[in-house]
Amino acid sequence: MNTTTATALSLRDPWAPVPSLGNLEAYVSAVNRLPMLTPTEETELARALRDKGDVQAAGRLVLSHLRLVVSISRQYLGYGLPQGDLIQEGNVGLMKAVKRFDPEQGVRLVSYAMHWIKAEIHEYILKNWRMVKVATTKAQRKLFFNLRSMKQGMKGDAAHGDTHRNTLTPAEVASMAHELNVKPEEVVEMEMRLSGGDVALEPQTDDGEESYAPIAYLADDSQEPTRVMEARSRDWLAGDGIAQALNALDERSRRIVEERWLKVNDDSSGGMTLHELAAEYGVSAERIRQIEVAAMKKMRKALAAA
């Protein structure tokens, strides 16, 4: 299929898969013509994918956000890697985001997908940028991905002087270090690495050094949306959730659960045993165990309904 025919087909059906168009400009032009989704359409398609495994819904969600991948890929053109490859890796991240997207969280897919798209592109860049220990901390990764653009910006702002110089002045080093929260010497070292020759990125030995290689620091999962929501859910369960579930129990069941699972004495011995509770209530240890099991089921039901 030639470019003219493929373009005509995509215009007839705006949701038709983007064909192989032969060059990057034609691809970018094609994805920019794909319709954007309204919030209602996005929610309905995401629910269809989540609840029914609707592949066509997933396809529309991906297609409508291909232009986002193209836009993000332009931010990483300064690393000497083909934009087509950057877009391809970003599309992988977009598909991962669509698969994990939950429409009930009140977040648009465009915001959720940005993390996944950038993470895949970052991984591709670091795998193909031949450098030893290019970034071993979050601040150094930020320095790696911002040093070139900041340096060019400082050159562009210069009113006079040699605009072709490659080295940074002490004042520029200090400014970058302050803005990116790293030491001035780290800025100088990173600049030397970026302008130096190729060296191996991956660890070359089997002595445990792989934990310090750049590959180990590709993504910061702490701010990934799913992990943030999971952390919030755990915090709620550990506090208000448990209290709410306990309120659903009668007084005896609540005390048994608290003594068996929630109480810690000064000697770290925990609460009362089944036999101690049985003696207090004048029933068998097995009866206490049955009450405990029933109470746990009731608490799980209360938590699920919250």
Image (cartoon, rainbow, N blue to C red):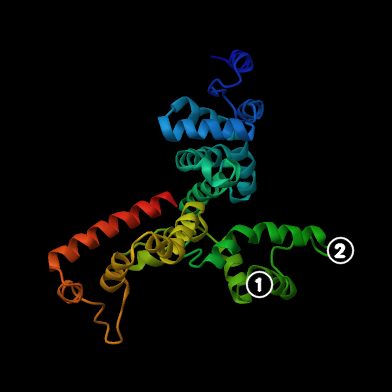
**In 3D space, how far apart are the residues under numbered discs 2 and 1 (Cα atoms)?**
23 Å
Residue marked by disc 2: 160
Locate residue 200, reporting x and y percent: 43, 59
> Toward the viewer: 219 or 186?
219
State which quadrant residue 215 falls in: bottom left
| Residue type indicated by callout 2 | His
Identified at 20% across, 74% down, the residue is: 277
**Where 37 sits versus 206, above or below?**
above
126 vs 271, left or right, is right
Question: Considering only vertical position in the picture, is 21 above or below 269?
Answer: above
Residue 240, which numbered label?
A: none
- Compare residues 284 and 112 and report the one nearer the observer: 284
Look at 35% across and 51% down and name the residue there. Answer: 301
Q: Residue at x 36, y 64 (%)?
A: 210
Residue 92 location (% of width, % of height): 48, 39
Q: Work out whether mark 2 precedes mark 1 in sequence or the reverse, and give the earlier one.
A: 2
